[in-house]
Image (tube, rainbow, N blue to C red):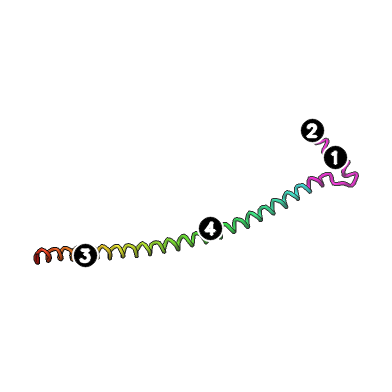
Amino acid sequence: MQLAGRVSDLMRYGAGAGEDPFAKVKALITDMVRRLEREAGIEATHKAYCDKEMGTTQDKIDNLKGTLEVLKAKVDKKKVIICAAEGRHQRTAASACKVGKVAG
């Protein structure tokens, strides 16, 4: 009850002098709201930047994954060609050995 009495007295005496007893509190609240709005704007700008960068990065990752698959397929084809060439080489070498034995 003492607090209510003090507030009542403050309002009565402050209002009697033509002053707003809550002017300081109103100013503090207004400043706080402005600061929070400014910080929210900065955070929104930062989030938009991050979202854009994440999208760009994901596009690059997807592109590089596709390129990797193409390159893996090319490597696999080259391995098949190498194995086939090695097989022909071994057959040719074996044939040459047989010919050498027959001729020798």
Residue placed under numbered mark 1 in the picture:
10
Q: Residues within 10 Å of mark 4 (few under 14, many from 20)?
A: few
For label 4, the residue is 54
Residue 35: x and y, percent? Answer: 71, 51
Residue in the foreground of this view, choosing between 69 and 5: 69
Of callouts 4 and 2, which one flags the residue occurring earlier in the amino acid sequence?
2
Q: Are marks 3 and 2 in contact (CB under 8 Å)?
A: no
Q: CA distance from mark 3 to mark 1?
A: 106 Å
Residue shown at 38% from the left, 63% from the top: 71
Observer-nearest of 86 and 19: 86
Q: Is residue 34 left or right of residue 50?
A: right
Judge whether 38 appears above or below 80 on screen: above
Q: Quadrant of the N terminus?
A: top right
Q: Which mark is residue 1?
A: 2
How far is mark 4 from mark 2, CA to CA?
Answer: 58 Å
| Sequence-wise first label, 2 or 1 | 2
Which sits earlier in the primary sequence, circle 3 or circle 2? 2
Q: Quadrant of residue 78?
A: bottom left
What residue does disc 3 label? 89
Image side of residue 22 versus residue 75, left or right: right
Q: Residue furthest front?
A: 104
- Helix, strand or loop at label 4? It is helix
Q: CA distance from mark 4 to mark 1?
A: 56 Å
Residue 54 in the image: state x and y as whole percent.
53, 58
> Which of pointers 3 and 2 indicates the residue nearer the eye?
3
Q: Which residues are magenta?
A: 2-26
* Residue 47 is one of the magenta-drawn residues: no
Q: Amino acid at mark 3?
A: His
Camera-nearest residue between 32 and 2? 32
